Image (tube, grey):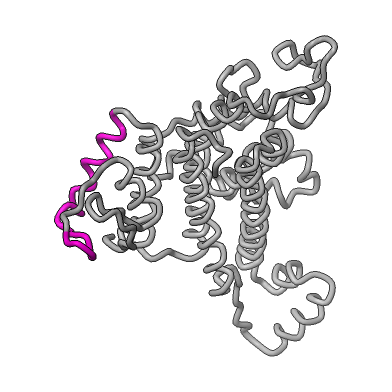
């Protein structure tokens, strides 16, 4: 963490918190085999027919024996698990690179999960029927490619409307942060320069004369950190809620755990953003003011630092004895 600018460390920790929550959810669903679809055959003949066809294609076997809905769910669950896993692997390595001042490598790693995985996962959550139809079409690759080129904003709008963060973010913010070439605070240009040594197609992205993209960049500069963490927490909030929404559709989550994630993720963003949002977040945490330090019994003092620690780490640091101790904030829900 020492390489990350001090004023951006909370934003980095918040992004890692969202990543870790999604990893925990993925591991729990895999362990519970929540993605597995079980079919009870109506007869032994049907069972034999399925077994025969399944030697070459289990999905076609399910369709041929009268279980198209179950086949669809197998496909969607399998895609969800694999795509979320791939997404989280890239995010983890990118965040670790940011901790080591490997900023250009981090941007390279972030490009795929934020511009590809995020959009496909959004499409699956916001319009499952359309995604499935495109994915299973004969020219599925072409259909999906066209949709990604022309329907990004519409997909984001539809998906965000189903999430509990619809009043925290806007679809246009997510879209402009990721795909608008001339947005000076967006990531599109940074991603292109991180991937390509030379960019010449668009004026906004054109490589400077006698230069290569980022090759001569001074890695002690903090400007790329500031640009990234100005938008990454919001993008991670959106992506994590999409992932949670897909898993909840696969198998309903515990209501308390779902609510805890919703509150912690939103309050965490407010602490990262600071200002009025920080004050609002502190006001929402009055329910912990009656507790006392387990060591010296001093009443809890909700400073912004302590409140953020409670939300993101389920821990509290006493302002009197300075002991850091666990506190199950997420269990209050």
- Of residues 114 and 325, the one drawn nearer to the viewer in this rendering: 325
Q: Quadrant of residue 218?
A: top right
- Of residues 263 and 157, the one drawn nearer to the viewer in this rendering: 263
Quadrant the C terminus occupies: bottom left
The relative height of residue 132 versus residue 30 in the rendered view (above or below) is above
Image location of residue 216, percent across then percent down: 77, 22
Q: Residue at x 55, y 59 (%)?
A: 23
Looking at the image, residue 61 sits to the left or right of residue 41; the answer is right
- Residue at the bottom extreme of this rendering: 44
Q: Residue at x 68, y 53 (%)?
A: 86
Q: Is-magenta flag for residue 9? A: no
Looking at the image, residue 50 sits to the left or right of residue 319; the answer is right
Image location of residue 253, percent across then percent down: 42, 64
Image location of residue 31, percent across then percent down: 56, 74
Q: Is-magenta flag for residue 291? A: yes
Q: How many marks?
A: 0
Q: Residue at x 64, y 28 (%)?
A: 220
Q: Residue at x 75, y 71 (%)?
A: 58
- Of residues 254 and 200, the one drawn nearer to the viewer in this rendering: 200
Question: Residues in magenta?
Answer: 276-297
Image location of residue 166, percent across then percent down: 39, 38
The relative height of residue 41 versus residue 315 in the rendered view (above or below) is below
- Of residues 305 and 163, the one drawn nearer to the viewer in this rendering: 305
Q: Quadrant of residue 206?
A: top right
Quadrant the N terminus occupies: top right
The relative height of residue 31 versus residue 44 in the rendered view (above or below) is above
């Amino acid at each position: 963490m020492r390489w990350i600018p001090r004023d951006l460390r909370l934003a980095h920790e918040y992004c890692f918190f969202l990543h870790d929550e999604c990893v925990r959810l993925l591991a729990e669903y895999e362990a519970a085999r929540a993605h597995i679809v079980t079919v009870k055959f109506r007869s032994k003949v049907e069972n034999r027919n399925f077994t025969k066809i399944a030697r070459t294609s289990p999905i076609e076997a399910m369709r041929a024996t009268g279980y198209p809905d179950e086949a669809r769910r197998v496909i969607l669950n399998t895609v969800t698990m694999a795509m979320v896993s791939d997404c989280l692997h890239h995010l983890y390595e990118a965040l670790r690179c940011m901790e080591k001042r490997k900023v250009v490598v981090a941007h390279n790693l972030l490009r795929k999960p934020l511009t590809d995985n995020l959009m496909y996962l959004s499409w699956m959550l916001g319009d499952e029927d359309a995604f499935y139809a495109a994915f299973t079409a004969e020219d599925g690759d072409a259909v999906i490619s066209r949709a990604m080129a022309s329907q990004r904003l519409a997909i984001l709008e539809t998906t965000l409307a189903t999430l509990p963060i619809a009043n925290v973010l806007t679809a246009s913010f997510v879209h402009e942060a990721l795909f608008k070439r001339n947005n000076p605070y967006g990531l599109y240009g940074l991603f292109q320069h991180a991937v390509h040594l030379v960019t010449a197609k668009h004026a906004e992205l054109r490589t400077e004369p006698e230069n290569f993209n980022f090759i001569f960049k001074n890695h002690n500069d903090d400007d790329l950190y500031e640009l990234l963490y100005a938008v990454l927490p919001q993008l991670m909030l959106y992506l994590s809620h999409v992932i949670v929404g897909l898993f909840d559709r696969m198998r309903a989550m515990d209501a308390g755990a779902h609510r805890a994630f919703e509150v912690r993720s939103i309050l965490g963003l407010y602490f990262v953003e600071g200002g009025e949002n920080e004050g609002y977040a502190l006001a929402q945490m009055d329910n912990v003011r009656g507790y006392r330090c387990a060591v010296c019994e001093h009443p809890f003092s909700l400073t912004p630092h302590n409140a953020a620690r409670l939300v993101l780490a389920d821990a509290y640091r006493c302002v009197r004895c300075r002991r850091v101790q666990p506190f199950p904030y997420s269990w209050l829900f």
